[in-house]
Image: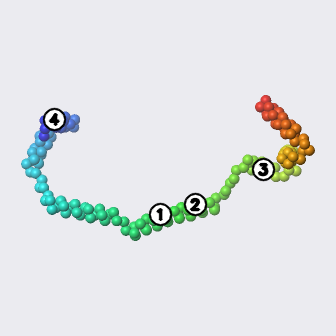
Amino acid sequence: MSKKAEENLSELLGQFYDGPEASEVLEDIKVGDAILGENSAPVPSDELISAIKSKTAERLEQQKTVPLRSIIYHVSTIAAAILIVVGIGIMRIDKAEIKTAGIVSASLWEGLSSAEENDELVTLTAEIEEIESELVALQLNETNGNGQNRVIELEMEYIEIESDFWKG
């Protein structure tokens, strides 16, 4: 053991043991190193090393070749898992209540079931139908030559409505 290694080991042992105990452990380690240095391990023969290498190579080759049975097993397991997941998904979709959301809430829609029940709905429906008929007439030029003026009037009404809206 070198002088530097002995100092490092002594410092390390000093952190775990008191002064005299650390010295005894250091001496025990030195004696153990001396015994191991006198009795070296036997060196295996070249034949034994080559036999171990060849057996290791054979085992590695066996692991590289995957039998067809193993591939079929893995593929069938994955396919079965996919089928189970799809089956559960289909069963849940069949049982689930599909709810849709619209622009108008369900309670309001049920309250406005017919135009006769609500005057505001009748008015809005009439205005929408009037606008639709005006647009169709403008598109087909059925305004008796007055189409350009009507478009300008509609633009002015739109601008007026827009400015009133932002004024509050």
Which residue occupies the foreground of this view, 61 or 33?
61
Q: What amino acid type should be assigned to the residue bearing mark 4?
A: Lys
* Residue at the image point whose x is 84% and y is 34% from the top: 156
Instruction: Say which quadrant the N terminus sits in.
Output: top left
Circle 3 SS class: helix
Numbered label attached to residue 78: 1
Q: Position of residue 49 (x, y in %)?
A: 18, 59
User: Which label's residue is closer to the chain start, 2 or 1?
Assistant: 1
How many marks the image carries: the answer is 4
- For this view, does 40 lie left or right of residue 80? left
Q: What amino acid type should be assigned to the residue bearing mark 1?
A: Ile
User: Which label's residue is closer to the chain start, 1 or 3?
Assistant: 1
Q: Which residue is mark 3?
A: 109
Q: What amino acid type should be assigned to the residue bearing mark 2?
A: Gly
Q: Position of residue 50 (x, y in %)?
A: 18, 61
- Categorize mark 4 by other alpha carbons within 10 Å: few (<14), some (14-19), many (20+): few
User: Which label's residue is closer to the chain start, 3 or 2?
Assistant: 2
Numbered label attached to residue 89: 2
User: Which label's residue is closer to the chain start, 3 or 4?
Assistant: 4
Circle 4 SS class: helix
* Residue at the image point whose x is 86% and y is 39% from the top: 148
Q: Which residue is mark 4?
A: 4
Residue 119 visible to the viewer:
no
